[in-house]
Image (cartoon, rainbow, N blue to C red):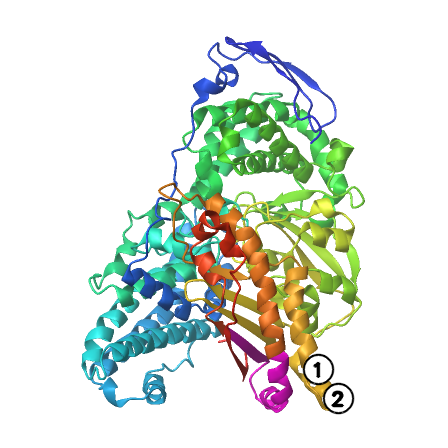
Amino acid sequence: MEAVMEQFGGTSAGWETMEIETPFGDPIRQRETSEPSSPLDTGLTPWNESASSLADDSWGEAPSESEALIAELLAELRDEAFDEALLGLAEETEMAVADRFTSETVENAGERERFAEMQLEGLRFEAESYLDRLHQGIAETDFASLSDAQLDQFLERFDPDQSDLTPAGEEFIGGLIKKARKAVKWVAKKAKSVARTIGKAGSKLLGPVLKRLKGLVRPLLKRVLGFAIGKLPAPLQPIARKLATRLRFEAEGEDEGEARVFAAQLDDMGELAQSFDMLVAEAVIDDEMPDGFGKAEEDEASDYAQGANRPMKLAEARGTLLRQLREAEARQDLSPEIEQFVPALLGALRIGIRLVGRPKVVNFLARFIAQLIQRWVGPKLSNPLSRAIVDAGLRLISLEAEAEAEGALDEDRVATEALAAVIEDTVRRFAENEAYVLDDEELVRIAAGEAFSGAVATFFPSSLIKESLQEAPSLGGVFVPQRMNELRPYARYSRVPEVTITEQMAEALPAFGGEALGAVIGAAELGFPLRGRLHLVQAMSGTTPSQILRRLGLRHGAMGTAALQPLTRAAAGVLLQEPRLGTDGPKRRARRPGLSKPGDRYYVIEPLGQGGTGRRSRPADASRFRQHVDATGRSVVLSYYLSERRAQRVALEMKSSASAAALARTLIGMMGGLQRRGGSPLGEVEAFALGGLAGEELSLSSLKSALGGLKGGLARRIRQWTLPALVAWLRDNSEVFQRAVQHPAQGVTLTVRLTEVPGLSLIANPSKILTNPGALKSAFAGKPAIAIALNPGRPK
């Protein structure tokens, strides 16, 4: 924004005259008649509302033996396919509930939850029955007589019959079986390393582990249910929370609030899977852990039960605010009403904790917003706003819910919901500021103006706001709130532009999962140039990608759920030539859609003139590259997945040229493409970040600063070590690739595993960089051991 606000006048007795340069283009001079002790003019010292420090004092601790074992087992349990299985299960459950109920209101919340529980009951029974059978079988087995191959065969005997399960249920059970097997094999391996034979003593070690694992099934599915019905589930809380925080260290320059792993609520299924893995690892390692520890999560007085109801409280508060806006008199001061609404919104926002305990800041923000929207409050004053929104293309997309059912367009409702959305979005944007901003009165005023301007630029038509604030003047649209009376509202752009996507454009844009948009379009068997419509959506509290696709009626289109992609600034610039229409969030949210964060924007592609492969509920698999770094275990795993279509094409090129050059070019291009599209140079980093600074606290920001240069150097060395070994292996094993392509499984996965990787010890203990800068120069001395494997099908 230009100058958000001019100097606030007044004395210690309160506000006198305040002149604001508003986003509407004409300064409003207004007399404020506040009480003498107004907190808006009390200076920095009296505010004194800093939130208590949440600094973690555990960075300097040395890992215990059990912590080291947990870190090792976590690396073994990590399974990205399980993340996808949880997401698929949540989406499938959400669809089942949506088919049964036409709306998501506070009134039918209990009925929807009971229906979702019934949907998952059979799956829960199947999962627990499998673990019971495995427990009983293990109790009667002498592991000393079993080789690794025989142990695999033994474990396969207990696999359940999945014929009666849904596709998502099958994937969930498959992922759970894989984790149970890994836990059993890991315990057997560790026990054999201690003694030559463990005999039937193996049952004493594994029996309690499987019993504890069974206790986690119900709370895990309860959280999946929460995602499906619009609740905000908390993670499965591990016993060792400090250890859990250290084990998952997001070194990608993300905001500290976004990087918290075990926060009050979950952002996506990846976090749920990580917390589940942590509890499984604790169940295996901690002999003294009670068998029923997972059931404690079901206590109705737990953090989960309290947090999960926040969306309903927000929906109730939003409904009250909408009613108050409709009933307000002309230019009525709505400060009290806004101030009552803010706590409910903060409770549903993950970052809302920053404003909790700051009543003076909240009071200021409420009065600030109220004064700026006053000119639009009241039936007559809101008419110009309604007409402007309608003229901006509202009739082209129509309104959903009540107005759509009635076949009429309620213009009063249009203005009311736009004002409510501006209030909600302003508070959301303001709450995203760092704590130091909230501690400074002048910064608070500036931040409030920036937040309000951003919200107005989103929900007000360009005809009513300054040219400098317009996000997409060439399109002339506006985001229109939808289903504001329900638990999960969202906003839809009033224009639906038609675009032509070339192959070059698609290869330059990232898609969910880390691959390029071109790979996603190719997997759907759509050709280039692709002509289509772009539906633009902004998430609000609780919005999910599957909900967006369902509301737009595009879930079963040619691209399936892959039709929805993040509307980043780069994507908005390339596709629409309007980069300000996009938003850039943390990189980890771009890796998987999960649960949207309020303010996230998406585009949904509706292909025109190409049929693709027909009706599709799930996206076709696209080629993708993953790079997983385990700093604790000093290992790096590179996973290249080639979709069936791409693998077949590469196989034909290899046959025609009688060389592996085509495959080598493809793999090298996939590795480089991740970084060109803005991915982290090291991918996901599992780091056991320990160490301290001579008794001083080692802050998270200091760690990130110290790791910055190391990550880039290590990424280059990984390429330097990997590519020659990869090319040499392909030269001698091209027939292995050809056989894998002929396998019935879809696609081919090539895995490169680097062990004893130089430099990772510094990521695991970054204090060495700060205390000994010379350590960075010799960090990459030596070479890792490299093993390469190629298998048919998706990554396992």
Q: Is residue 149 found left or right of 227 in the rendered image?
A: left
Residue 210 locus on image (x, y percent): 27, 72
Q: Which residue is mark 2?
A: 657
The answer to whether the residues at label 1 and label 2 have Cβ atoms under 8 Å apart is: yes
Q: Quadrant of residue 124?
A: bottom left
Query: Is residue 736 rendered magenta in the image?
Result: yes
* Residue placed most toward the observer, 35 or 325: 35
- Three-letter amino acid code of the residue under disc 2: Ser
Q: Is residue 531 visible?
A: no
* Residue placed most toward the observer, 299 or 709: 709
Q: Which residues are magenta?
A: 726-753
Residue 292 locus on image (x, y percent): 23, 62
Decide: few, some or many residues near mark 1? Use Cα within 10 Å; few <14, some 14-19, many ≥20: some
Q: Quadrant of residue 181?
A: bottom left
Decide: few, some or many residues near mark 2? Use Cα within 10 Å; few <14, some 14-19, many ≥20: few
Residue 133, above or below 80: below
Residue 408 locus on image (x, y percent): 67, 44
Residue 661's disc is 1
